[in-house]
Every structure is written in C-alpha cells, then in structure tokens.
C-alpha cells in the first residue's frame, strides 16, 4: 500500500488529499511523518516538505507531481479534461491556485505574528495575492466548479488556496479579496458543498486551530527554535565532514 505523508494544515498536502477523496482511492494510507521538521526528515526527504508519496520505499515529493502521477495511475474518474485543450485549462487554473495564490500565502503566513511582521513583505506578497484573485475572477467557471462543469485537479489546488486567503490573510492586516471578486466568491461558496472539498476543509480548519493553540500557548515558538537549532547543528556537522 502506498503512503501519503501529509499534515492537516499543509495546503499542498490538502491538494493531494482532495484528489484522493474525489477519486475514491482507498489504497493510499495518509499519515503525518513522525520526524517532520527535524534533520532526520531532511535526510530522508531532501526538499524537507510535505506531501511525499511513498511508493514501496520510492519517495515522490511535490504535490503537482504526485497529483499527475495519481491521475495517470488511476485515470477513472478523470480529474482532467477530455482533450488536450481542456487539460490545458485545468492545469492553468491549478497553477494559479498553486503558484500565484497558495505559494504567496504560504510565504506570507509568518507575517500573521505582529511582533515580527515586516510590512514590506506583507505589501509585496499580499499585493500579489489580491491581484491574482482578481485575475482568477476573469478565468474561473460560473457553474460551481473551476472549469468543465465538474471536479478537476484545478479545484483540488484552488480549494486549499482559497482557504488560506479566507482564514490567514486578514491576520496580516490585509482585507480578504474574495468577497469583492464576484465570480470567485460564488465559486468558493459552491465548491464548499462538494464532499471532497468539504472533507479537506474540515481537516484544514482542524490543523489551523491546532496551530493557533500552539501559538497561544507559546509551544510553537519553542518548537520552531528547537527545530532551527537542530537543523543548524546538523548543517554544521555536515560541513565539518
């Protein structure tokens, strides 16, 4: 059985989990790696990020690569189009969700901590998010799905991206741009009713609440400091060999 190393709050992992749920795949175990955030994890997975798909010991990183692999391995039900042009449409919208929205939100998320906030970073990355939501508003479907009138890989990328915008962006002092983008707002309300989307939203909210509790208690800051110390020590030891 394959394993997907994942985490509730990881939007990239959520993208793959939504695909798994939409396709009804039951032969992939989903678990959080016990060593995540430690030097040992980076020894096993050099990129140091999740998700990672474990295929009988062959480790495959990167959510987009995993998504395409699973689509080729399990082509039915298809989350791509019926022809090359439709596939290009799906992939374009998925890239907007992944690169233009999710990546910027991922890098922006540390700026929710007011004590260490850099307004220049907030202005740069937050501005990119707002502009890209406006661009998405001109391209997204109007029937409750990103495109093609059904669930596709585009929805799998857009749902976790929209979650971050709605739940994290305001923590940086910026206004959520979704309500002002009429087509995106309508899409967002509609897609939440789809079972695979609803399932990952429950998981993302659970992960966000756990993270906020760790921050409130001071445990998160201690965990990050310990992880950095361990990483620095490991890199120093590696450099000495």
Image: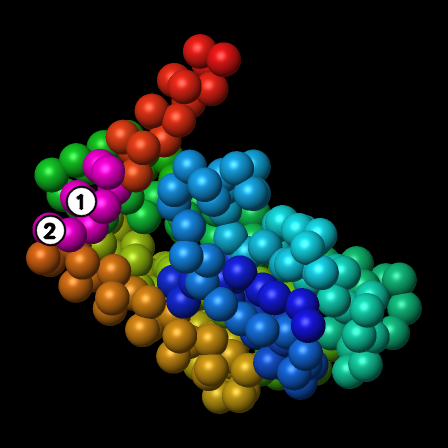
Q: Indicate left or right for 111 with 5 as reference.
A: left
Figure check: 126 above or below 69:
above
In magenta segment, residue 224? yes
- State the SS at label 1: helix
Q: Indicate left or right for 190 with 202 as reference.
A: right
Q: Which mark is residue 10?
A: none
Residue at the extreme right:
83
Q: Indicate left or right for 55 with 181 as reference.
A: right
| Residue at horizontal 17 percent and vertical 44 percent from the top | 222
Span of residues in magenta: 218-226
To which residue does mark 2 refer?
A: 218
| Residue at horizontal 29 percent and vertical 65 percent from the top | 208
Asked if one can make out residue 2 in the rendered structure from this viewpoint, the answer is yes
| Residue at horizontal 64 percent and vertical 74 percent from the top | 28
Q: Which mark is residue 221?
A: 1
Asked if one can make out residue 137 in the rendered structure from this viewpoint, the answer is no
In magenta segment, residue 211? no
| Residue at horizontal 38 percent and vertical 17 percent from the top | 236
The answer to which of 158 and 227 lies nearer the viewer is 227
Where residue 73 appears, x then y in whole percent?
81, 69
Quadrant in the picture for residue 24: bottom right
Where residue 170 appears, x then y in whole percent?
25, 57
Mark 2 Cα shell of 10 Å, populated few (<14), some (14-19), many (≥20)? few
Contact, mark 1 vs mark 2 (Cβ under 8 Å): yes
Mark 1 Cα shell of 10 Å, populated few (<14), some (14-19), many (≥20)? few
Where residue 178 appears, x then y in whole percent?
39, 65
- State the SS at label 2: loop
């Amino acid at each position: 059985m394959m394993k997907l190393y994942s985490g509730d709050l990881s939007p990239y992992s959520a993208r793959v989990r939504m695909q798994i749920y939409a396709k009804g795949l039951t032969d992939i175990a989903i678990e959080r790696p016990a060593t995540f955030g430690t030097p040992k994890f980076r020894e096993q997975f050099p990129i140091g990020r999740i998700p990672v798909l474990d295929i009988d010991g062959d480790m495959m990183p990167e959510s987009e690569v995993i998504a395409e692999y699973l689509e080729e391995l399990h082509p039915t039900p298809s989350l791509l189009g019926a022809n090359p042009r439709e596939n290009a449409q799906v992939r374009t919208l998925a890239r907007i969700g992944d690169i233009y929205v999710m990546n910027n939100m991922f890098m922006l998320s540390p700026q929710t901590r007011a004590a260490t906030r850099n307004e220049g970073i907030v202005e740069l990355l937050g501005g990119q998010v707002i502009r890209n939501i406006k661009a998405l508003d001109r391209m997204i479907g109007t029937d409750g799905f990103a495109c093609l009138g059904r669930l596709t890989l585009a929805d799998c990328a857009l749902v976790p991206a929209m979650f971050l915008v709605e739940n994290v962006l305001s923590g940086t002092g910026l206004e959520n741009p979704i309500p002002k983008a009429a087509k995106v707002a309508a899409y967002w309300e509609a897609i939440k009713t789809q079972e695979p989307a609803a399932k990952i939203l429950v998981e993302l909210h659970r992960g966000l609440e756990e993270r906020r509790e760790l921050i409130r208690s001071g445990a998160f800051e201690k965990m990050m400091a310990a992880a950095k110390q361990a990483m620095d020590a490991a890199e120093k030891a590696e450099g000495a060999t």
